[in-house]
Amino acid sequence: MDSSRTASAFAAPDHDHTACVSRALADAEAHCRAHGLRLTATRRRVLEIICQGHEPAKAYDILEQLGRAGRHPAPPTVYRALEFLLDARLIHRIDSLNAYVACVHPNRQHSAQLLVCSSCEQVAEIDDPQIQAVLDQGASRHGFKVDSQTVEIHGRCPRCRAAQGADHEGA
Amino acid sequence: MDSSRTASAFAAPDHDHTACVSRALADAEAHCRAHGLRLTATRRRVLEIICQGHEPAKAYDILEQLGRAGRHPAPPTVYRALEFLLDARLIHRIDSLNAYVACVHPNRQHSAQLLVCSSCEQVAEIDDPQIQAVLDQGASRHGFKVDSQTVEIHGRCPRCRAAQGADHEGA
DNA sequence: GACAGAATGTTATAACATAACAGTCTGTCT
DNA sequence: AGACAGACTGTTATGTTATAACATTCTGTC
Ligand SMILES: [Zn+2]
Ligand SMILES: [Zn+2]
Ligand SMILES: [Zn+2]
Ligand SMILES: [Zn+2]
């Protein structure tokens, strides 16, 4: 009954999210220390806000959250922090949503395939070497040299399928 | 020496682009007639503008082009036409660029994997069933039901690699 | 404590997109 | 023809996302 990690990259609703966030922040700090990057207070706070849910966070929502703490920063504050976090590979941008999610494993290179649930808005990041390989192959078949890939798959996550799609079809 | 279609989905610089555009518009008209869709003057004109190059077209650039013909339409005019063309599957939106390209084969269902050259800005659309299959598999492995995919691959097209990358590495 | 470079603050504006409502066009029915 | 419905377009205003440019502050080093 360990439902917290059954065949899904989606976070279980009952998981210890406080620990989840702490771990992400600790990882980020270690990662930055190891790479000579400065995870300043603002940057750390922005990452924390992004980590608050497993849903994508939008730039101006992050901005508003930052504002709650008395200060009322302007957009560049957030966008600079986002740029830093993107460059440090600590977050991903979801182009199809203009939103940002924390990276689940910032310590190794990966290609960021994102599963986006249209129903609950949660995002799961998978790092499927087979997908990357097939994309590379498909591209080289056309003489194309891949620099980066954006793979965003929209659909329904297992939890939402179970909750509402039970009358549609099994499997 | 039929260099116009050698192993690449990218348009050759010497191809007959006038014919290219005419064919696209004729196809679009046939497609709309067949599906009971109304390809009005504005919609047709927007498609024509998008077809003008094999580079992605941005909404406000299209708007400006429309304005050259005396009229000076407002943004909704363009966005409505784009919405129609997207729904009719005559164009694709490139999320990572906020831009639009004509679909190369509007007559069948496909998954729109786009190769975007960072150097010449050209975009090639490939419809690789293997890529689609692997993405579906990867997603279902996580219990995820795919509705739609956004696959945008950034890199360098064969022509740009040949032109500048000759000193880097062969193949 | 002077200096350089990084980071942040601040103001303004660019770039992308849609809401809401009014008017026009197109075909259909009588 | 005239009335009507629905699709399309025009127009105004605004919402949303992102960056340019320049001033200031912070951080570590000499
Ligand atoms: Zn969590
Ligand atoms: Zn869901
Ligand atoms: Zn052409
Ligand atoms: Zn190129």
Image (cartoon, coloured by chain):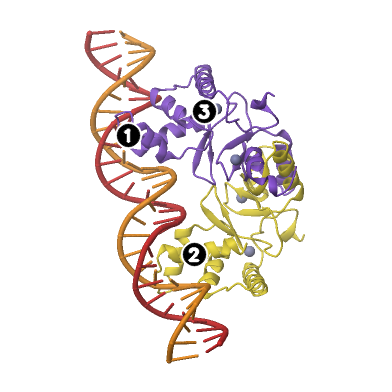
Chain colours: A yellow, B purple, C orange, D red
Residue A164 position, x and y percent, is 62, 44
Cα separation, mark 3 vs mark 2, equals: 38 Å
Residue type for callout 3: Ala
The disc at residue B88 is 3
Q: Work out which residue is located at the far front of the displayed protein and give it.
A: B167
**Which residue is denoted by mark 1 in the rendering?**
B73
Quadrant position of residue D10: top left
Residue A50 position, x and y percent, is 55, 63
**Dot 1 crowding, Cα within 10 Å, few <14, some 14–19, many 20+:** few
Label 3–label 1 contact, CB within 8 A = no
**Dot 3 crowding, Cα within 10 Å, few <14, some 14–19, many 20+:** some
**Which residue is denoted by mark 2 in the rendering?**
A80
Q: Is residue A96 above or below residue A52?
A: above
Q: Which residue corresponds to the image point at 51% horizontal and 51% vertical from the top-left?
A: A98
Is A72 displayed left or right of B90 in the figure? left
Residue A111 position, x and y percent, is 68, 53
Residue type for callout 2: Arg
Cα separation, mark 1 vs mark 2, equals: 35 Å
How many numbered circles are shown? 3
Between label 3 and label 1, give the one nearer the viewer: 1
- Chain holding disc 1: B
The answer as to whether callout 1 falls within 8 Å of ligand 3 is no
Nearest to the observer: residue B159 or residue B99: B159
Q: Considering the numbered disc 3 on the image, is that residue within a helix, a strand or a loop?
A: loop
The answer as to whether callout 2 falls within 8 Å of ligand 1 is no
